[in-house]
Image (cartoon, grey):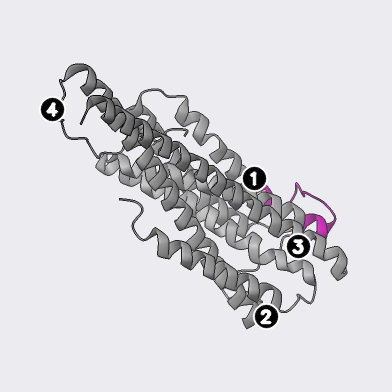
Amino acid sequence: MYSKGLKPLSIASLATLALALGLVFFYAPNDADQGFLQKIFYIHVPIAIVSLCGFVAGGLMAIQYLRTNDRSWDMRSYVAIHLSIVLGLGVLITGSIWARGSWGHWWVWDEPTLVSFLIVFLLYCCYQPLRFSIEDPERQARYAAVFAIAAGAFVPINFIAVRMSQSFSHPRVLSATGGSMPGSMRLTFLISLLGFTLLFVTLWKLELTSKHASMQLKRLKKRLELDLEERPAGAPAPPVSTVPAQPSRD
Amino acid sequence: MPALPLDEAGKYVAAAYLVVFAIVLIYVAIMAAKLSRIEREVDSIHELLDKSGR
């Protein structure tokens, strides 16, 4: 169900990321201002973009769940948000390393871009505790969907607010006029962004496949156990449902 | 601040790339652990089927 196209997707992600790494270190020139340190940009910014898009995608999938009441959309939303949190952690750590090298501080509290990303990250850190504090699967999925939609809407609003604010030290690399990156840097950045997008989709599909298989197996086992207790050997077995259950912490 | 020399900047760049690599690696390792759990589940289902004689 979810594993369709996983193998070519994995190969494409690995190839694109390998190409991106090659371009970062052997093709893109060193930045005139920051020198070699600016190479962090090619990993930090793409994972930040992919992570934020993952949060928004999680919200859109949650809308789809509320519209259709199809549990598979809830599962998709949950995995997208979960994976975005993991990438978000990477964004915060790589950002701190870059800040230390560039500004001499691990964190700058009066910088809107940094603080806003931290707020978004901490907001989404509440998603899982909220979700798993509700035992009823129906309510769990519905409440999680509402949270995902509200938080997903907050992400672009937050992004626009930060763009409109006065930046003190964080550079604005991407702008409506195309930014100030030369062609080689822009190409490297775009390949890196593509690589991380493919990686996100690959891991998302991988986790969905794993969760779906695990839940189907649990259901099958439960059914077999019940069947063994109730039915004599040789009698026909009832069909096993393929509807995905709610996400578990497994 | 002026640009850091290559040996100094290299440490930060290596650290940033290693962090991302480690995060992806840990994620894949967790997925592998889950896969082995699924494998054990499949084995237990086989045992149940053997018990039922089907």
Distance between the alpha carbons at the discs numbered 4 and 2: 67 Å
- Identify the mark nearer the N-term, 1 or 4: 1
The disc at residue A234 is 4
Image: A88 above or below A240: below
Q: Residue at x 54, y 34 (%)?
A: A126
Same subunit: marks 2 and 1: yes
Q: Which residue is mark 1?
A: A118
Image spot of residue A115 (x, y percent): 67, 47
Distance between the alpha carbons at the discs numbered 4 and 3: 64 Å
Instruction: Answer whether labels 1 and 4 touch (C-beta < 8 Å).
Output: no
Q: Residue at x 42, y 35 (%)?
A: B40
Q: Chain of mark 2?
A: A
Q: Nearer the viewer, mark 4 or mark 2?
A: 4
Q: Residue at x 36, y 37 (%)?
A: B42
In the rendered structure, the answer to whether residue A210 lies left or right of residue B19 reads left
Q: Quick one: A6 or A225, which is closer to the camera? A: A225
Q: Which residue is mark 2?
A: A27
Q: Which residue is mark 3?
A: B13
Amino acid bearing label 1: Leu
Most common SS among magenta residues: helix
Is residue A43 covered in magenta?
no
Same subunit: marks 4 and 3: no
Q: Residues within 10 Å of mark 2 (few under 14, many from 20)?
A: some
Amino acid bearing label 4: Gly
Q: Residues within 10 Å of mark 4 (few under 14, many from 20)?
A: few
Identify the secondary structure beneath mark 4.
loop
